[in-house]
Image: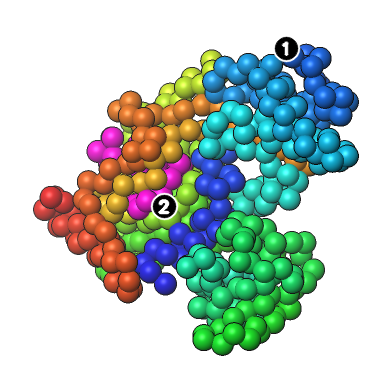
Amino acid sequence: MSPGGRKAVIGFVIIALCAIGGVGVLLAKPWAHSAEVAGQDELDPQLADSAVFNSALPTITASFFEDVDSRSLVEAANQGIKRLVEEGRSGDEIVARGITAMVDSLDDPWSTYLDPKALAAVESQLTGSFSGVGIVMKSLRNEIMVDGLLPGAPAQASGIQVGDVIAEVAGQSTRNLTLSEAQQKIRGTEGTTVRLGMRRGNSSQLIYFDLVRKSIDIPVLEQSVPEPGIGLISLADWTDGIEAKLEQALTDLQAQGVRGIVLDLRGNPGGYMSEAIKAADLFLRSGTIVTSKGKNSSLNQEYRADGKVLCGLPLVILMDRGSASASEIFSGAMQDNARAVVVGENSFGKSSIQKIFPLSDGSGIKLTIAKYMTPSGTNIDEEGIKPDVVVSNPAFGDQDLQKEKALEIMRKMIAGQGWR
C-alpha cells in the first residue's frame, strides 16, 4: 500500500465522509411540524399526503445556503416521481424519489438525500465506529481490491489477504458497484453474516468467506515517535470526540520529551467542523480560526482562539489531495496564523458546511448551509490549501517522500535553523 494510502482508503471507503458525510456535519433534530410553502398545493397527491415529504420541503427552503424557489422544488419532485407513478409504484419509494429529485435540483454536489441505511452509516462513521468486517478497500482497474485489514477484525482472522479482489458480496457481483455501494453491502447489523467471494492471484475461481459482522472502532488517531525528539500524530478523520484524543496524544508526546510535532492529515476527508476548530485552539494563542457565512444570520460567525495553548511546540502538517473540509479548516488556521509549516500537495478544496436533517422515517437530508473562509478571508473552494513546501510521493512503491521532508523540516525547526 502506498504511503498515506491506508489512511486515505479508511477515510474515503470505510468512513466515506466526502461521499456521504462531508465537512461540518452537524446532526439536527427532526422537524417537529410542517410549514406551508409556496407551490405545496401543486404537489402530486402521494407526496402531498406524506408527512415525511412535507417536512423535507420546508427544511430545504429554510436551510439551504442559497435562496430556493419552493415552486421549483415542487416541480422537480413531481417530475422526479412521474415515471414511478405511471408504473403504479407507491409508498416510501415515491416519497424517497420525490425528496431525491428536490435535493438534486439544488445542483449542489454536497447536498443529498440519505435513505435510512445511508444515514445510519453516516451517523456511525461520525462516532468513529461501525458494524462490518474490517476490510480497507480501493478501486483498481474497475475492480474492488483489498488494500488492508483492520487488526482484530473478522476479515483479518478469516484468511482474506491484501490484494484479493472482492468479486461478490452476498451473491451479487461487484462489477457495477462503486466503493461506497460495496461498503454499504458489506456493512450490516452486528452478529449477522455476509458472504464474500474473493478472487486471488491469477485464478478465476472464487474463494468464499462467510464473515460475521462485529462492531469495529475505526483507528482514527495513531501516535508515535519516529525519531528522537519528534512526535508524529496521524488523524484519519474528524470524528466526534477526536479533539479530546488529540489533546491526550499531545500531552503524552510532550511528557515523552518531544520537541516538535508532525501532524499527518493526508487522506483525512473531514468530519465535524467543531472538532477541527477545538483542535486548532490547542495550538493557537490568538487569532481567527475560521469564519462562516450563511443565508441565516446565526451562521455568520467568526471563531477565534481562546488564548489557552496546550502545545506551543513547532508544528508541521502533512496534507494531500485527500485532505478536505475540516482538515482544511484546521490547516488553513495554522497556515494563515503562521503557526505551522504545511508540507505535501494541494488539499481537496471544499469550503462548504453541511448539516444533516433527520426525517421521521429514519432517512435524512444533508444540505449545504454555509460557506467558510480561512482567517485571511480565502475561499478555498476547488483551489484547496496550498502547501508551503510542495512534495509528491511516487505513484508506485512505499517511499514516503512527503513524510521524509516533514521530518527534515522539523529537525531544522528544532535546531532553530528555520524551515526554508
Which percent across, then down, holds residue 348?
39, 45
> Where on the picture, by quarter, is residue 37?
top right
Residue highlighted by disc 1: 38
Amino acid type of the residue tagged 1 in the rendering: Ala
In this view, the residue in front, 306 or 291, is 291
**Is disc 2 surrounded by few (<14), some (14 to 19) or many (20+) residues within 10 Å?**
many
Q: Magenta stretch?
A: 319-339
Residue highlighted by disc 2: 322
The quarter of the rendered structure image containing the N terminus is bottom left
In this picture, is 43 found above or below 397?
A: above
In this view, the residue in front, 250 or 140, is 140
Amino acid type of the residue tagged 2 in the rendering: Gly
Q: Earlier in the sequence, mark 1 or mark 2?
A: 1
In this picture, is 303 found above or below 173?
A: above
Which percent across, then down, holds residue 95?
80, 35
Which percent across, then down, holds residue 260?
28, 56
Which percent across, then down, holds residue 42?
79, 17
Q: Is residue 101 visible?
A: yes
